[in-house]
Image: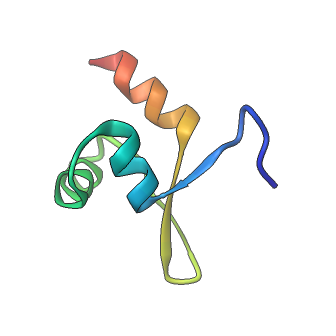
């Protein structure tokens, strides 16, 4: 399921990757700075999209 271009991160992994709290990650998602994907009651982020969002800043 996981390849170099399609790495999926949990909320915790995404927050750790960005060195922010889960609260900040949720705020950024609510502000549509990041896109979250829900599957089975869980929230995931695509690493590629996080990297793209970082470059936009």
Q: Quadrant of residue 55?
A: top left
Examine the rendered structure and indicate whether residue 55 appears above or below residue 38.
Answer: above
- 44 relative to 35 in the view: left or right: right
Q: Quadrant of residue 50?
A: top left
Q: Locate the C terminus by quadrant.
A: top left
- 12 relative to 23 in the view: left or right: right
What residue is at 58 percent from the left and 82 percent from the top? Answer: 40
Number of callouts: 0
Q: Residue extending furthest bottom?
A: 41
Residue 52 image point, x, y percent? 47, 25
Residue 30 image point, x, y percent? 24, 56
What residue is at 74 percent from the left and 33 percent from the top? Answer: 4
Along the viewing direction, whichever of 27 and 12 lies nearer the viewer: 12
Residue 2 image point, x, y percent? 77, 49
Q: Quadrant of residue 6?
A: top right
What's the colour scheme?
rainbow
Examine the rendered structure and indicate whether residue 52 appears above or below residue 13.
Answer: above
Residue 46 image point, x, y percent? 56, 45
- 10 relative to 39 in the view: left or right: left
Q: Locate the N terminus by quadrant.
A: bottom right
Along the viewing direction, whichever of 55 and 3 lies nearer the viewer: 3
What residue is at 40 percent from the left and 40 percent from the top? Answer: 17
What residue is at 25 percent from the left and 59 percent from the top? Answer: 22
Along the viewing direction, whichever of 10 and 46 lies nearer the viewer: 10
């Amino acid at each position: 399921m996981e390849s170099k271009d399609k790495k999926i991160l949990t909320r915790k992994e995404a927050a750790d990757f960005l060195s922010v709290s889960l609260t900040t990650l949720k705020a950024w998602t609510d502000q549509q700075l990041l896109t979250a994907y829900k599957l089975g009651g869980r929230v995931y982020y695509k690493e590629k999209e996080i990297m793209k969002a970082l470059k936009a800043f």
